[in-house]
Image (tube, rainbow, N blue to C red):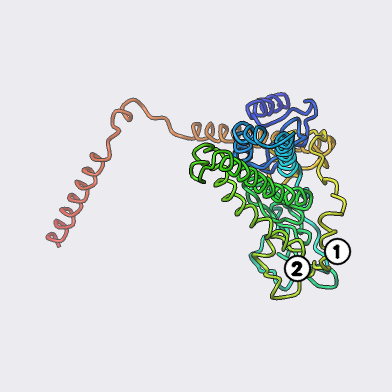
């Protein structure tokens, strides 16, 4: 009996492709990460789900710079004295390399993801029980938790929300990104151009990337203008004739002028956010200019908080070794996604699963045995019928005709009795 149950459970586990054997080697956390992120180089780089947008952004940066180096820089080298043209070319290449590095520092690192809890937090006195409703689930484990609780920030009481996906009360300025499916600390926004959330750990690099891109656009625009001006002086040409002599310079002038308005406006907006210590999410949702901002500690301190503070270490070790019985346990919200899932816990869950299956199989076997026994008892109690009775079995139509005939005979008998009286 026990051998049959064990073999059956083994067959079930072998058919499930998402199950991992207990004796299988350890796997790394990024391989079973629940969020929508994409990992490269063994979990050393973490990107958002829209990784292809980074390739598009790279093309928008590299293609104009390549045209500048091939077509415009040659004219500057020939027309400018000494080594000025080479210097202008070197500055453009170094500036572009700097921007590419900032792009990958922004999009290829943890923006400040908060690890998910293994179980919902306990209800404390700070929770706002007045706002709880009777239909509030609170968590996926069935424990009723209030949707918000109060936290004091710089002497001002703010409310933080409970995240049912991560099973935690979000810290102040934290929000859950629906695209990456993670709670991000000091969440600013999800940038589609870099394919990553902008949070506490990469906001500085994001701002430097945007502002440096603005400066690169202005630099290439200025160099193209100088090249057009040199062409006009060399042959006493008009602007349109100089444009025809170097069409690449004219196209780059138009392109960089348009892009500089976009990235320049974005840079100006984030300068305002930095000086007032706001995030893009807070600016569009809370409108702090209408009420007091609990995070604004003065222009100087706000600037120092963004550019001079130490970037905190990541709260997730994506290369940490973890052992799990089922990879689906990491993909369901009832289990943790951090390295806190130890081998002992996984073995216990595996044993519990086997015991449940053995109990179910034993119960099913007992039910089948009882059903067979009851059927045998019914067969013994049923009277035997001869072959004639089997031949006399009738269809439902013949049975209905027989009933009608019996009713007619009964009516005739009652009529005769009435006449006899």
Q: In the image, residue 69 lies at what x, y percent? A: 64, 33
Which labelled disc corresponds to residue 247?
Answer: none
Kindly tell me whether residue 28 is visible in this rendering.
Answer: yes
Residue at the front extreme, as displayed: 236
Up-down relation of residue 299 to residue 108 (above or below): below
Counting the numbered discs, the total is: 2
Up-down relation of residue 21 to residue 154 (above or below): above
- Residue under the point 65% across and 35% down: 79
Cα distance between the residues tagged 2 and 1: 24 Å
Q: Quadrant of residue 275?
A: bottom right
Q: Mark 2 points at which residue?
A: 159
- The residue closer to the viewer here, 218 or 395, is 218
- The residue closer to the viewer here, 76 or 69, is 76
Q: Quadrant of residue 167?
A: bottom right
Quadrant occupied by the N terminus? top right
Q: Nearer the viewer, mark 2 or mark 1?
A: 1
Q: In the image, residue 308 lies at what x, y percent? A: 86, 54
Q: Mark 1 points at which residue?
A: 301
Kindly tell me whether residue 353 is visible in this rendering.
Answer: no
- Residue under the point 82% across and 45% down: 314
In the picture, measured across the screen, residue 54 lies left or right of residue 414, that is: right
Which structural element holds mark 2? Answer: strand
In the picture, measured across the screen, residue 59 lies left or right of residue 288, that is: left
Disc 2 crowd rating (10 Å Cα; few below 14, some 14-19, many 20+) is: some
């Amino acid at each position: 009996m026990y051998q049959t149950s064990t073999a059956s459970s083994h067959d079930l586990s072998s058919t499930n492709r998402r199950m991992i054997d207990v004796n299988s080697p350890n796997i790394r956390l990024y391989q079973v990460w629940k969020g929508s992120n994409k990992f490269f180089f063994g979990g050393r780089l973490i990107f958002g789900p829209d990784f292809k947008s980074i390739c598009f952004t790279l093309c928008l940066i590299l293609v104009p710079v390549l045209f500048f180096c091939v077509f415009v820089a040659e004219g500057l080298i020939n027309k400018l004295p000494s080594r000025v043209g080479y210097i202008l070319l070197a500055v453009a290449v170094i500036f572009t390399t700097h921007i590419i590095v900032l792009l990958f520092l922004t999009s290829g690192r943890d923006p400040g993801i908060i690890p998910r809890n293994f179980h919902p937090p306990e209800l404390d006195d700070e929770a706002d029980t007045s706002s709880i409703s009777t239909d509030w689930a609170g968590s996926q484990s069935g424990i009723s938790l209030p949707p918000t609780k109060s936290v004091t920030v710089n002497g001002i009481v703010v409310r933080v929300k409970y995240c049912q996906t991560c099973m935690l009360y979000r810290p102040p300025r934290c929000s859950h990104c629906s695209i990456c499916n993670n709670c991000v600390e000091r969440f600013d926004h999800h940038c589609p151009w870099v394919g990553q959330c902008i949070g506490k750990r990469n906001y500085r690099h994001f701002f430097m990337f945007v502002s440096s891109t603005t400066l690169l656009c202005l630099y290439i625009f200025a160099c193209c203008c100088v090249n057009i001006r040199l062409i006009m002086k060399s042959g006493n040409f008009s602007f349109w004739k100089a444009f025809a002599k170097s069409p690449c310079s004219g196209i780059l002038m138009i392109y960089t002028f348009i892009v500089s308005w976009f990235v320049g406006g974005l840079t100006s907006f984030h300068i305002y956010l930095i000086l007032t210590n706001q995030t893009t999410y807070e600016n569009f949702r809370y409108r702090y200019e209408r009420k007091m901002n609990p995070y604004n500690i003065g222009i100087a301190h706000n600037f120092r908080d963004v550019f001079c503070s130490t970037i905190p270490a990541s709260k997730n070790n994506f290369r940490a070794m973890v052992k799990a019985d089922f990879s689906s346990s990491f993909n369901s919200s009832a289990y943790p996604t951090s390295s806190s899932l130890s081998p002992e816990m996984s073995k216990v869950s595996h044993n519990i699963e086997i015991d449940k299956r053995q109990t179910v199989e034993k119960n099913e076997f007992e039910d089948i045995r009882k059903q067979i026994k009851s059927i045998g008892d019914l067969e013994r109690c049923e009277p035997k019928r001869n072959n004639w009775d089997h031949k006399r079995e009738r269809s439902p139509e013949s049975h209905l005709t027989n009933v009608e005939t019996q009713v007619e005979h009964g009516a005739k008998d009652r009529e005769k009795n009435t006449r006899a009286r």
